[in-house]
Image: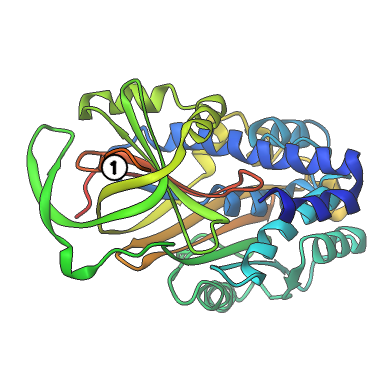
Amino acid sequence: MVFRLLPLLLVVGSVQAESWERVAEGNRAFAVSLYREVAGEPGNVFFSPFSISTALAMTYVGARGETAAQMQSTLHFPESPEYLPEVWGMWQSRVDQVGREGKVTLSVANSLWPDERYPFLDTYMATVRERFRSEVFPVNFAETEAARQQINTWVEDATEQLIKDLIQPGVLNALTRMVLVNAIYFKGTWQTTFGPEVTRPQPFHLADGSVIEVPTMYGKVPARYAALDGVQLLDLPYRGDQVSMLVVVPDTQERMADLERSLSVAVMDQWLGAVEPTEVRVFLPKFTMTQHLALSKILQALGMVVPFDDKAANFAGMDGHENYLYISDVVHQAFVAVDEAGTEAAAATAVIMQARSMPRPSPEFRADRPFLFFIHERASGSILFAGRVMDPR
């Protein structure tokens, strides 16, 4: 992996490389803080920190003053609105490279949907179009339903039809001035696939103490594994070994809450530093889930308050006017399916801007209780997707 990364670092120079690495580190920090907020609700959890960060990064480029400061702090952006796009472009290029090399399918698409009647600054539009490689589709938000359908159709096409109806009726209105969208699609085949013929019902221990049976895959596979105090770790690679799924299973289901409370970037780095290559007897349930998240209140709880304030938000970098545009909504939808062949996952995020108006015996890894999982790009450490399985059904 080091040799794939070096050419990029040599080209961009040490200062830019350091900034690029800080963006990836910020992504991990935001992923952890957002996970801890979302995980407060019961049930399964799944979302794409990469998608959410990217959609909000395009928005951040237009933020100024306290609006920009709160976004930078909440989203863990290491750069100011003026300098982030260049660094972000390098980071996104790294993710794009993984998809281009063809071992897994990984595609990222961005789009801007400005109101055709509203005079956004040419400099802002050019920056987002060039640095984020965003398509631009002017629409008339007075024709709200038509605009909503156009955006949702674009999202469906960008996610292989996995994300549908991202923007629900009522989210847009005649005062909407811009919708910023990110879509990410991933499909990876396990480096060593599981045989469907050995998948069979196995016990899964729910958080309430009851036991159910769920279709569970089994295989003796090469992976990265570690058993630490109170937790088992499995880093299961996809073909090409550039992306993998880190599965984290506590020794008992009672420890799940403690595990989530202690989750941090340092803890994740410790986990990834602890796993070592070996052959593992893996028991992993098949699962499929779809998650819808309304992120406005969650982001405000994390400290991003002023950007949602219709009287105080400052997005003068978008239109040249202070205290006119504000974020009215941030919506996110994610899908994941894990089976014997591998994983298919997709997510989309929309930000709505509104005018105010081994030789030894193989270890055994058994995910038979609630567990966490993170799909990450290994070279940069970027967390593409994060989730929790409480009930595989």
**Residue 179 can be seen, yes or no:** no
Estimate the x, y position of residue 321 in percent, counting from the top left. 86, 48
Residue 246 coordinates in the image, percent (x, y): 43, 44
Q: Answer with the quarter of the image where residue 125 lies.
A: bottom right
- Label 1: state its secondary structure: loop
Q: Is residue 331 visible?
A: yes
Placement of the C terminus among the 4 image quadrants = bottom left
- The structure's colour scheme is rainbow
- Residue neighbourhood size for the residue with mark 1, other residues' Cα within 10 Å, grouped as few (<14), some (14–19), many (≥20): some
Residue position for label 1: 362
Image position of 267 (left or right of 392):
right
Residue that appears at 21% across and 27% down: 252
Q: What amino acid type should be assigned to the residue bearing mark 1?
A: Ser
Q: Is residue 213 above or below residue 288?
A: above
Q: Residue at x 34, y 54 (%)?
A: 221
Q: Height in image: 362 above or below 98? A: above
**Total numbered labels placed on residues in the image:** 1
| Picture residue at 71% right of the left edge, 38% below the top | 311
Viewer-proximal residue, 353 or 183? 183
- Left or right of residue 166: residue 127: right
Q: Residue furthest front?
A: 359
Relative horizontal placement of residue 14, taking residue 259 as reference (left or right): right
**Spot occupied by residue 21 in the image (x, y as percentages of width and height):** 74, 40
112 vs 287, nearest the viewer: 287
184 left or right of 279?
right
Give the quarter of the image for residue 95. Answer: bottom right
